[in-house]
Amino acid sequence: MSAINLTINELAVEVTPGTTILQAARQLDIDIPTFCYDPELAPNGACRICVVEVENARTLIASCVTPVAPGMVIHTESERVINARKVILSLMVANHPLVCITCEKTGECRLQDYCYRYGVTDSKYSGEVKELSLDDTNTFFVRDMNKCILCGICVGKCQEVVGAGAIDFTRRGFISNVGPAFEDSIEDSTCVFCGLCIDNCPVGALTPKYSLGQGRPWQVKQVRAICPYCGIGCNINLQVKDDQVIGVKPVKESPVNRGHLCVRGKFGWDYLKSSDRLTAPLVKSDGVFVEVSWEEAFGLIVDQIEEVKLRCGDDALFGLCSPKASNEEAYLFQKLIRSLGSNNVDSFTRHCHAPAVNALMEAFGSASMTNSIEELAETGAILVVGANLAESHPVLNYRVREAVRRSGARLIVAHSETIDLVDIAHHYLPLRMGSAVALVNSLANFIIEEGLHDRAFIDKRTEGFEIFRKEVSGYTIKYAAEVTGLAEDELRAAARAYAVAERAAIVSAVDTDRHADSANLVLALANLALLTGNLGREAAGLYLPYGENNLQGIADMGALPGVLTGYQSIKEKNVREKFARAWGVSINVKPGFTVTDIFKHGKKSGIKAMYILGENPVTCSGEHLETAAFLTDLDLLVVQDIYMTETASLADIVLPAAAFAEQEGTYTNTERRVQLSRKAVEPPGEAFPGWAILAELAGWLGFDWNYDGPQDIFAEIASLTHQYAGIDYERLNEQGLQWPCPKGDHPGTKFLHNGRFSRGLGRFSVVDYEPQAADNLSICCSKGHFNCQCLSENLSRHSVINTLRNNNV
Amino acid sequence: MNTDAEATAINQEIDLHQVDSIIEPYIGRKEMIIPVLQKLQEHFGYLPRQTMEQVSYRMHIPLSRIYGVATFYAQFKMRPRGRNIIRVCKGTACHIQGSPKIAERIEENLAIQNGETTTDLRFTLEEVACIGACALAPVIMINDNPHGRLTADKIKDILASYK
């Protein structure tokens, strides 16, 4: 189709057919006011404020819903248009309380801005006005529906984007309103408290309770940071006033979350101000913690580490790294442990993510999610297995919904529970818990039987297909139907839907459905993607989002017992030599203990001293009492954290650390996007950024480290790590960069395995359904994600969002 | 103010199997929400909250959306209706002939307002725009029976004739 030429305000513009007048004007940076228009929602043309004058048209035209036509001559600010807008504003103001002097929205209220722009000071249409009472019944935000102008943006976000469907228009005419069914309270509705309604309300109808009376928009500094909860790594603007964070808003420009957040990002940040924060170094003396100076704490650590090393050897020290540490912290942490002579550094993420990580390594040679968050919305079919994204990764869930809503993607949901996506799924497979491997194998077998597999891709890019084909042939649809409890036709239809899509994606996450035999399920899913050639291409792939904000990053940084940064194996001599040269120490050839080894063997592991960076093994290792006893028995336990956790309370020395908002650092999200989080406020009391504590301690231990700041540390990481080599803080500025990014002019890598798998050829694996896996589930600790928390809930339980959990459980 | 919420407090035993059998033919057809609600209202006389919750659950439509539809259209009733429906004509002719006084007298007699139902479920009162019997103004209809050329004093006896 050929382009359309038209003129707006005397300016010529060429646009593609189907473009609306509003979109065309925006291409020319012409500002047409809007209330009810939102780029991600279907336009409804309700508010009429966007009317424009089109020459030779009989009436003024709503620009948000009118497609351009060739030769249109448009005026967006003609006298007729301005008069119409004045009338619309005047009608709105007639039933809108003009309490701008105290309204929290003053300064960023669109109604106020447009009244200012068109000189509407009050209304000539006086009449009945709404007199609804203020609704402050929920924990998180206040609703003043008298201010609502019924634009419907909040309804669209809630129903279409989020899928919570908590609110809609109610009634009709003068008494129409927006709210939950039956005028129930928000907390009794299906609201998930993602805050999208608040962030997109053009007026002051919705206000987070935390911002009430805290400051005017123009007094507030915006500091761009990265959400500290899950692996999506949403970009947030911390609202800062008087060295205090007073709120959080999503960043609209970020390709990661595009203006979306969930309850954790929107409301979970208040743990920063928790009275439980550690504010001074503590040393245990006769069973009681006493505050000491940093010098004293460092002195004691040095003495005791040296004593343990002397008595029990280098391998008696173990470092446990939190997946919430920044890249710089994790890098320095493993550098410190390795400089002290052992590779004993690991993290707890093994427990929940290692099976998936190992499976991906086996199949593709890289443990990361293959494609980007952004691409998901473009795909043709999505198979969701073993994932309840609305709880674990809500922002990714919005993208799945977007794919269905806007790109017409076919959605196949296999879950033992009626999760929210079932509402919009084309194929719902309510399988028996624990039977997912049988399901996925049968889909693969059916796809082969029907000849829907991608032979060219299999020949060129994969290995092990023939064995796989033979082994999987036992998984007939009939057998799968018996095992999963699903109808045969449904299985066939689902297999076809996935296989025939030009590009199809698979999503699986940390979820009870995946716990039974996680590694096997991931391998089975990898087989399915290999079979259909849905790898190494845009908007296809296998999405296994991580549960923690920097799980990807700390693994990249080498906080693992067998590898250094960028997964460089310590078994390789040239790798050890490279790091030895860079660090001025020798690198131990022996791989370190894994965290599983340590906590399984306890005392017998030979570990005498442990440095725990922001982790809480007492609550998340699964064996509370044994873990606590083991930690208590250590000769030295140093815990660096922001709270006095159950683990910290067992420590000999506790070091108070800065939280994410109190320091600069980078985090690598689940799509390998390295993102820069800025410092917004000072840490409380004597607390220090983690990197500074580690660097200072290294000095006390006799190492010659010199870093002026995280930027220096990152430069060192880049110099030693191929995947990060082309990244520096300046390049990270707005969007971050996805590794591998080997050179300074490299744009980063949107999706992996383009043309070649990390391991060369993609590998089919034979995985069998194990019926006992389903039985194990009853005793399996089902540590799923609740929407309001993350894994060990170390942050969320110090936040107001914890109230949601208490309500849920 | 919260009249609909109150309405749902009226505890009527709802046979969910009955509700399901009404919904069943429409499952997978979200655009049929209005016919589903009409059928339910036909059966129950109004839309009890439990029926709307069941529609939400079975048809995968948010309850807020169903409530939005149900409160948008005047045809949907959220409260049980009386055995006898009184329609007071508020058309021009009736108005001139004194329909406000007629309505007022009915309200006094039954102690309900326009749109409400007596607690014994005997009467529901509704004001309507015009029932097309202007020659009989002022006129009311009770169920299918017109009562015309009314005066307020006749109301008591007319109401008494309906049980």
Image (cartoon, rainbow, N blue to C red):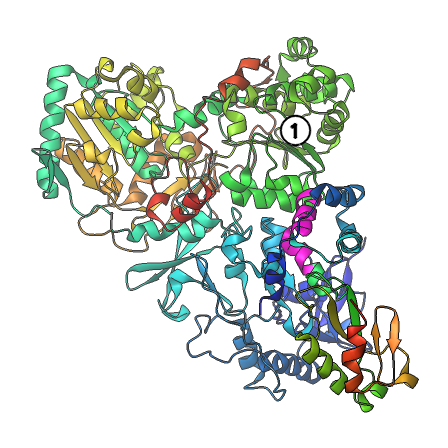
A620 w.r.t. B7: above or below: above
**Image point 55% across, 23% down: which residue?**
A522
Image-based side of B151 in relation to A590, left or right: right
The residue sitting at the right extreme is B135
Residue A330 percent location from the top left of the image = 32, 34
* Helix, strand or loop for the magenta stretch, by majority: helix
Of residues A429 and A309, which is closer to you in this image? Answer: A429
In this rendering, does residue A289 appear at all? yes
Of residues A452 and B117, which is closer to you in this image? Answer: B117
Range of residues picked out in magenta: B50-68
State the image quarter where residue B58 is shown. Answer: top right
A270 w.r.t. A585: above or below: below
Residue A126 percent location from the top left of the image = 61, 87
Residue A394 percent location from the top left of the image = 52, 44
- Give the position of the C terminus of chain A as an image quadrant: top left
Q: Is residue A782 magenta?
A: no
Describe the element under mark 1 as helix, strand or loop.
loop
Q: Chain of mark 1?
A: A
**Image point 25% across, 17% down: which residue?**
A602
Residue A500 percent location from the top left of the image = 75, 30
